[in-house]
Amino acid sequence: MRGALRTKLRLFSLAIALFALVLCLRLYYIQVIDGQEYAFAAERQYEKANQALFDRGSIYFTRKDDTLLSAAGLTTGFRIAINPKTLSNPKAVYEALAAVAEVDRARFGTLVAKTDDPYEVVIERVSEDVGEQIAEQKITGVIVERSRWRSYPANAAAQSVGLVAYDEDSLVGRYGLERYYEYALSRERAGLFGNFFTEIFAEAGRAAGDARDASEGDIVTSLEPAVVQMLTDVLLEVHQGYGSTETGGIIMDPKTGEIVALASLPTFNPEDFKDADPRAFGNPLVENQYEFGSIMKALTVASGVDAGVINRASTYEDKGCTTLNTKTFCNYDLKARGVVAMQEVLSQSLNLGAAHIAGKLGRERFRDYFTRLGFGEETGIDLPSEASGNIENIRTSPRDIEYATASYGQGIAETPVQMIKALAALANDGMVVTPHLVTAIKLESGIEKKLAWSSPTRVFSEEAVEETTAMLVKVVDSKLADGTLSIPTMSVAAKTGTAQVAGAEGKYAEGKYFHSFFGYFPAYEPRFIILLYTKEPQGVQYASETLVHPFMDLTHFLINYYALPPDRVAQTDI
């Protein structure tokens, strides 16, 4: 008897505990998760009975101190409509509305004339203050409704953040992160307790490929707003200064693949894109493919060093021009250098030197390195519509000429994000990482879900990367602007690239060039890698004329902004 009673008491206590847990969970959702909704409910006098306020998760930039800044969120205000049937004095109504908000007189007259329609929107979005001023006047025939809409307060990295627009009758993410993480950002709840327990017990740390299956929540990115703004300003100066058709850049942590900033021009204003050129909505950083030119030589050199076919002391005879498979190619200036060391392949950007290394590697080995670097396939970045690049010339051709031109960045095409992924191996001990923007999803339960990304894969040995890095540092210290841009207290590894632009019928267009530049620092323990490019700049031929100073401006900014300590001692005259 006593045992049975004890069992009943335990069951009763358990039932009470479970009931209390349910009440606590319900209270948590009411006060924390749904608190804003209940606040809106207090103002239902402004809403139509069947109106549902727009709801969507936020996208955040992350400042260097780990605080968050809204890149995409919700703005609350009002929608102003009229019932033409009940307007007794349209002129007076117009004047009352125009006194506090911008109203198109001609359009207002057109709407007033629609007396067979009881509802016409006059102003789609007005602020809280303006809406309340209009509501307080209690104008017969004027309808004031609570409204919410997508806003982009940072107005930065528009192609990558994306936008929200109608897909038939639904507002959904159409580009960028808004589209890629649509499932997480949309608000189609499965139910209070289903969501809560799913989030509590979901597998922690899904891979990047599973990111779009995450629960509803807010998106936290690695984009740093001040760095994004600085990059955009620098790119704008290049783009406008040289009349380029396209300009872009990426700043990334080479150790983790976290993208700190990215931007491309021309762009659009996500707050007002109705009149924007639809071509600006696409993201050239992941969608467009380019022949990057001589920055590819850094990877060719690293491949040769890693394979043991060359080292810094190796030499070759440079004749200025040579012929393979009946096709002649030359150095950029057509000049022969005679017997030169491998350092000059990078310092003087010698096409014949890169082709010499490709020949020493052989077709299969050369193809293997470039394939393992990720060329010819998607990077896995968390942005939609990614292109895979084009390396068919070295996949299928038996001709040596295709490998020779690929060694100096012509004849194969890559997206900017593919290019920085491959180059980052030089800044990460020979390891390739997955570029990405989102680091976590803040679930509606309050739990922050960190996203896991693919593990790094080794392509080069640490020794090969260190030797290549030393060669790239010498390029900056001795060759770049004759060494005048070298930073006495900071080692910087970098390389310029100039490529011809393919025109009609597969031929290169006369006088059109694609400029690129990459670099990383501190060179032997890198914090950042930068990739810049500009397409078809006017009045200049070489990237050394367009992108060197912008790169150094960004380098100095990042050193100062992040207070990076010096990695070498400045030499002073005694």
Image (cartoon, rainbow, N blue to C red):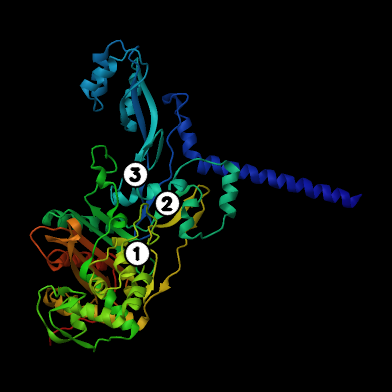
Residue type, mark 1 in image: Gly
N-terminal label among 1 and 3 = 3
Q: Is residue 469 visible?
A: no
**Residue holding disc 1:** 376
In which quadrant will I find the C terminus? bottom left
Judge left or right: residue 503 versus residue 170.
left
Spatial CA span between label 3 and label 2: 14 Å
Give the total of numbered labels: 3
Q: Callout 2, which amino acid?
A: Ile
Q: Which residue is drawn at 24% across and 77% down?
A: 491
Q: Residues within 10 Å of mark 2 (few under 14, many from 20)?
A: many
* Tag 3: amino acid: Leu
Measured as percent of width and height from the top left, residue 304 is found at: 30, 81
Tell which of 104 and 329 is nearer to you.
329
**Marks 1 and 3 close (CB-CB < 8 Å):** no
Q: Which mark is residue 337?
A: none
Q: Which of the two marks, 1 or 3, is nearer to us in this view? A: 1
Q: Which of marks 3 and 2 is nearer the N terminus?
A: 3
Q: Is mark 1 on a helix, strand or loop?
A: loop
Provide the residue designation for mark 2: 219
Residue found at x 47% / y 48%: 217
Looking at the rendering, which quadrant does residue 268 occupy?
Answer: top left
| Tag 2 and tag 1, C-beta contact below 8 Å | no
Q: Earlier in the sequence, mark 2 or mark 1?
A: 2
In the displayed structure image, the side of residue 183 where residue 481 appears, left or right? left
Q: Name the residue under label 3.
A: 163
Q: What element carries label 3?
A: loop
Q: Where is residue 263 in the image (x, y as percent from the top left)?
A: 26, 55
Q: Residue furthest bottom?
A: 313
Nearer the observer, 272 or 172: 172
The answer to whether mark 3 and mark 2 are in CB contact below 8 A is: no
